[in-house]
Image (cartoon, rainbow, N blue to C red):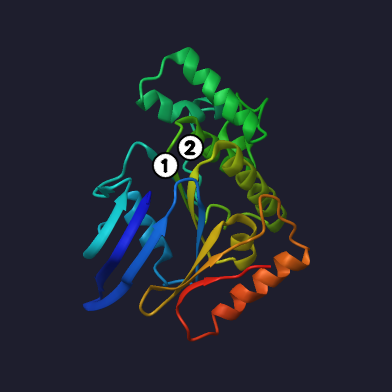
Amino acid sequence: MYIEIKDACKNYVQDGKEFTALDHVSLDIEKGEFICLLGPSGCGKSTLLNALAGFEKVNSGSVKIDGKEVKAPSINNITIFQNYGLLPWRNVLKNVELGLESKKVPKAEREAAAKKYLELVGLSGYEKRYPKQLSGGQQQRVAIARGLAVDPDIIFMDEPFGALDAITRMKLQEDILKISHEENKTIIFVTHDIEEAVFLADRIVVMMADPGRIKSVVKVPLGDKRDRTSENFLYVRDRIFDLFNMKSEGYIEYYI
């Protein structure tokens, strides 16, 4: 198994009180899967993402990628956040080249790779613009292109479209789904939006709060092309919604 989370626990102390962010979480993820971590605020989904990305360590249990315990962030993986993280003094092309510069990739190769991924995210012709000249959706596309340019093994995404308007968010969902299939990347995506999870994921990890835990893991049997208005899509969406009102836990698969 590519990613293995075994009995992971994470506790914090805040204002003198201890609370459990992750409570004995176990999950296996295959290479190339698109996994959505879905749940309300405080259910531990971002904590779990941060443990996988190496930004935090669990108090007990284990988190392994490709058989190796995660102890720190890896240059082989990238994380895309909601705030874009673009450098305002660098133009679009130079922002996308940033990770390649840290890898000491020659200039000509950096530029070629940056242009390739800007084209992939629909931003050819924007190379000389600066972040302040872009919309929020365009800035997030630049952040995605920058992440893809370094050819990561895993892409971690923490509610990357949460600050965008509904139309832009749906377009970027379509883009990242297309990219995930074309590039065959392993993607771990945090969201609290049920429809977003159903549109994107191969499997949805439904999480609950107090303490943060996995309630169910749901396989989404909708194939590569997804229609938000189809009966199958709406059926899966409604079943996910129902899970938040069910008391049972465990691995659940829905087939249509």
Q: Are marks 2 and 1 in contact (CB under 8 Å)?
A: yes
- Callout 2: 10 Å neighbours few (<14), some, many (20+)? many
Name the residue rendered at 24%, 77% in the picture: 18
x, y (%) of residue 139? 58, 41
Residue 78 is tagged as: 1
Q: Name the secondary structure under disc 2.
A: helix
* Residue situated in front as seen by the camera: 217 or 106: 217
Crowding near the residue tagged with mark 1, few <14, some 14–19, many ≥20 C-alpha atoms within 10 Å: many
* Residue 253: mark: none
Q: Nearer the viewer, residue 12 or 2?
A: 2
Dot 1 falls on a residue whose secondary structure is strand
Taking the image as shown, residue 139 lies to the left or right of residue 80, namely right
Which circle's residue, 2 or 1, is located before the other in the chain? 1
Quarter-of-image position of residue 243: bottom right
Label 2 to label 1: alpha-carbon separation: 6 Å
The residue nearer to you, when weighing 3 against 112, is 3
The residue depicted at 25 percent of the width and 59 percent of the height is: 62
20 vs 158: above or below: below
Q: Mark 2 = which residue?
A: 147
Question: Tag 1: residue type?
Answer: Ile
Q: Quadrant location of residue 25?
A: bottom left
Left or right of residue 113: residue 170: right
Q: Is residue 133 above or below residue 58?
A: above
**Residue drawn at x 71%, y 55% as measured from the top left:** 226
Above or below — where is 26 with respect to 101?
Answer: below
In percent of width and height, residue 51 lies at 32, 56
The reply to whether residue 194 is visible in this rendering is: yes
Left or right, residue 84 beside residue 233:
left
Q: Give amino acid for label 2.
A: Gly
At horizontal 78% and vertical 63% (from top left) the residue drawn is 229
Residue 16 picture location, percent across and down: 21, 77
